[in-house]
Image (tube, grey):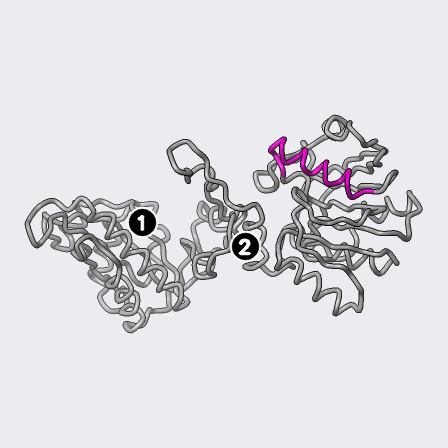
Amino acid sequence: MAQLRMNVQAPIDRLFAERWSTRAFHPDKPVEKTEIAACLEAARWASSCFGEEPWRYIIADRFADAESWNKVLSALMPKNQLWARHAPVLIVAVAEHTFSHNGKPNRWAEYDTGQATICLCLQAATLGLVTHQMGGFDADAMKQHLAIPESMHVMSVTALGYRGEVEALDADFEPIESASRTRKPMQEIVHAGHWGQVWQPPAGAGWEARYQETSVERLPWFHHGLDADFEQALAQLELNEGDVLDIGCGPGTQSIALAKRGFTVTASDISRSAIESTRLLAEAEGMSIDCRVDDVLDSKLTAPFDLVLDRGIFHCFPDPVDQQAYLTTLKRLLKPQGILLLKCFHKDETGEMGPPCRYDESDIQRLFADGFELIEAHNTQFQSTAMETAPKALFCIIRKK
């Protein structure tokens, strides 16, 4: 099911994170009338201009009133009918466009009806139900079939029911259901103070959100045990002791593997939940690791390190200013002749999902030209316990001059 949010930018309540508009409904499981009533009660308490409450709902329940349900279904666009025919309940939302107290046009009627309907959908989610709002229908046919007054505006139809099997859907819908959920970035939709001035969310908030709402084993970058490229590099460099910094340690698996090999490990991440995950894993494994909440772009760490591991952090910084901050941090934290093991997405990886930056050897050579020496670079893959396919990656051994 398509529940993994790929570009989260701040922690939110799990109710909002888990709500999504599936098309897969259980066709044989009715919704209890008390549950429908709870959803409608949530809508009833939505806010509205002047307390007008301009929304009205028509409930078409296939198990209680098949005739009305079929009328609503027949007014949907054909493509919506393909999946909505499995939903046990179809809810038609209409809006009254004049104020009752003065008869003047209510320009907020549609906005307020939308507020009420999302309240309905969120309440449904708390009950373990799923919803899908539709705008694809014949409004005139809907009015005729359901005897809706001409003054009312048909706004939407919401399918309500229990989650079904994606495999039961028409084949055209399966890719949509299995795709990860994405949204436009805040920087594209939020302005600071005036139009055109970008509002920036805190950099670490998105990472914290991912770790709060997703178990570490399901994260795309989770890899149980030491990454094979890191293992090969350690053998090649004959490194088996020293002070190591695992930046962006995430679930902590790389830190634990290094500690087991005898390294003195500091694990840092911008997410408190990631650091807590690392701490708990180290405790369970009987390993001593210094776990720090830290932002590599504004690092407060002071100890110099013989070795720094970056398994998927540098490629998250498309901004040249952030890239320079990253390099400045490494110059300060690495000992002279210290080694950076860097793994990032390769330019040949063309998948839509993943970090904003992809590099080849020439890019790394250019970006790390000041103060660093590229010892080796080779093409590889990002092996992950949580992903079926491994994205193309670039692995580099870089020495501080």
The location of residue 137, given as percent across then percent down, is 26, 46
Q: Quadrant of residue 354?
A: top right
Q: Nearer the viewer, residue 134 or 123?
A: 123
Q: Which residue is mark 2?
A: 209
Q: Quadrant of residue 289?
A: bottom right
Q: Viewed as shown, does residue 265 lie left or right of 196?
A: right
Q: Which residue is mark 1?
A: 134
Residue at 67 percent across and 54 percent down: it is: 250
Query: Magenta stretch: residue 325 in it?
Result: yes
Q: Amino acid at mark 2?
A: Ala
Query: Magenta stretch: residue 174 in it?
Result: no
Residue at 39 percent across and 38 percent down: it is: 193
Residue at 72 percent across and 46 percent down: it is: 311
Can you say whether 312 is above or below 70 in the image? Answer: above
Question: For numbered disc 2, what is the local secondary structure?
Answer: helix
Instruction: State the extent of the magenta-drawn residues as a range.
Output: 317-334
- Indicate which disc residue 57 carries: none
